Amino acid sequence: MTWLKPSWQAVLAIALCMIAVVFKDPNAGFNYWQSWGPMIGLAVLASLISMIRLAPVVEALILLIGAHLVAWMLIRGIGSFEGEVLIPYLVALIAAWVLGINLAMLAPYFLLLTSAWLLAWRGVAVLSSLQPTEKWARIALRLIIPAIFGAWILIIWEAVTRGAGIPFILLPPPSAIGARIANSLPILGSDVRQTIFKAVLIGYVAGNLAGFAVAILADRVPFLRRGLLPIGNMVSALPIIGVAPIMVMWFGFDWPSKAAVVIIMTFFPMLVNTVAGLAASGHMERDLMRTYASGYWPTLLKLRLPAAMPFIFNALKINSTLALIGAIVAEFFGTPVVGMGFRISTEVGRMNIDMVWAEIAVAALAGSVFYGVVALIERAVTFWHPSVRGG
Amino acid sequence: MDSFRSKIIPVTTILAGVVVLWYVFAVILNAPFQRDLDQRGNETPSTVEFIGKTLSQPKPTMPAPHQVAVNFFENTFLRSVTSNRSLVYNAWVTLSSTLLGFAFGTALGIVIAVGIVHVATLDRSLMPWIIASQTIPILAVAPMIIVVLAAIGITGLIPKALISTYLSFFPVAVGMVKGLRSPELMHLDLMHTYSASASQTFWKLRVPASVPFLFTSMKVAVAASLVGAIVGELPTGAVAGIGAKLLAGAYYSQTIDIWSALVAGSIVAALLVMVVGIAGRLVDRAMGGRPA
């Protein structure tokens, strides 16, 4: 048996395929029977091959290709019966299953989906047990594994929403959201311009600069530091987002009020982190600077600010998320007829849920890009830090 | 105690400065409207009278601290607790969904952390997504969750609590992963020499080691959870809760109401963080921790 190494995922996947074959009911009205044989065959074949002792890379490749092909065929096959099977029907099915009645209709579909998912799981497990020595391979693995996980979230989302006929209003499938994004690029673009390029960026820059300046001031005046730090820590726990209606009242409906909310939200994290960071340089280094007879400003610029950079970037990262949240939520309190928060709240009211999801996808993308850019700049600036150097 | 005393003077000085600045700004911001009003009424008040008037407008641009304090006091202590204008009632509505969401979020965070620490596949595949999930401005989803769940008949506490859950699971998950991994190799080796099983190592070494991390992250989580509950109340059509109070105040320009709702929210936040902190200290002491 040395050439065989069973894995529970593969065995379970084969078992599920077998059950699916038993439950198969050609009269069920589904349209995917023509690809039925290939799907079952592929799943079983991939499971069987994966249990032969192979190079792990080959095994993972076979598993992942098999799993994704099956999933792709499944989702393509359901194109024609989406919406037929509504939630009440699913509930009835579950009830039937509990009562021990034959559930021939949907079972094969979900059994196959589950076995494809198990295969992908096994593939990812194999991949994550790899310990490559080359740097590029490690980086590639670090990207591929989460990417597969994300892909399966989308696959299962798509397959379940369409397969089980979940009402469009409740949760539209990713493909519909993608189509909506592609169709309404101009609207999304103008929303992004209004919310992100005006409110978020201006507020983010101003808030961080203000926090930084006050932190330097507090550093010069110890009395101020002792007073401001506890207050800053305290404020970070408060629901600052509540100032949004006040800012809208003061600065009007357009972007300045949103930028003001963002400034207030980003100010305190920056203040607290910069003050903590300025205390981060060690006594030895500071004494060294004193022996060089360097005054306050040269010491600040050449020693303490660089040493504070990890803290400052921590604040910048926290603030990148806070800024987006602040701007979008502030728009719930009143806007001109453009902006991401405005679009979300009005389209929810009109039950255009796919548009809301499109807006959320754009916001998620913008948030991730924002965070990623800050993280990249951080790597470039704090190249000396152990956490970057060691990577 | 010494550090406390060295802090209290600067803190009170700065707070006093904030109050003074607040009064100054209240006068400056309310002045244009008051001047306009006086002109129409053909009144020429003296400077002192004028300042007095700017600080006692019924719907000021910026309410003065004492106006907020009076409004807060009236709505907290003088109204019956069941009245829907009572801040105690509204704070309670928000607090209940905060606590429910916080409980869900903490449980979810702990479960995810245990999974990540024990299953390598989850560690490699889930962890990046957990971090990415927080770069998403998820509060934007709040109105949709509320409206959609209302469309299928789920209203009240649960939708708001779900938003709180989403916001509070992240700090707990990240903190717990750190905490469960905090035992050093030496300690793990020691457990190994005792031939401890995986579950014994987990319960007797990893869990106790993670408790301080858990409480630190729970403090962050409970504050986030309150924000989630408040934002969750915005799109519900202003029924009750601190968020609803904010929205109603914004609709009717009741600025004083907005400010006192903000004060109420801040007090609830401070109390929640304090309670979690005290609970953490009690648990620490019960487990035999010595003050550092």
Image (spheres, coloured by chain):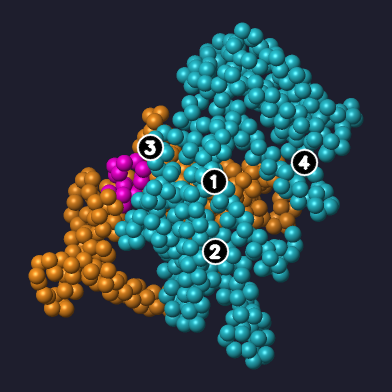
Chain colours: A cyan, B orange
Give the amino acid at mark 2.
Ala
Category of crowding for the residue at label 3, using alpha-carbon neighbours closer than 10 angstroms: few (below 14), some (14–19), many (at least 20): some
Compared to residue A194, the image places residue A236 above or below, namely below
Residue at horizontal 59 percent and vertical 13 percent from the top: A105
Res. A315 mark: 2
Compared to residue A204, the image places residue A45 above or below, namely above
Query: Which of the 4 image quarters holds residue A163?
Result: top right
Question: Of A30 and A334, which appears nearest the observer?
Answer: A334
Q: Are marks 1 and 3 on the same chain?
A: yes
Give the amino acid at mark 1.
Val
Q: Secondary structure at mark 2?
A: helix
Q: First in sequence: mark 2 or mark 4?
A: 4
Q: Which residues are magenta?
A: B233-248
The residue sitting at the front extreme is A186
- From the image, tell me which residue sits under label 3: A349
- From the image, tell me which residue sits under label 4: A127
Category of crowding for the residue at label 1, using alpha-carbon neighbours closer than 10 angstroms: few (below 14), some (14–19), many (at least 20): some
Quarter in which the C terminus of chain A is drawn: bottom right
Question: Of B191 and A76, which appears nearest the observer?
Answer: A76
Which is closer to the viewer, label 1 or label 4? 1
Give the amino acid at mark 4.
Leu
Q: CA distance from mark 1 to mark 4?
A: 31 Å
Q: First in sequence: mark 3 or mark 2?
A: 2
Residue B141, visible in the rendered structure: yes
Q: First in sequence: mark 1 or mark 4?
A: 4
Q: Chain of mark 4?
A: A
- From the image, tell me which residue sits under label 1: A362
Residue B283, visible in the rendered structure: no
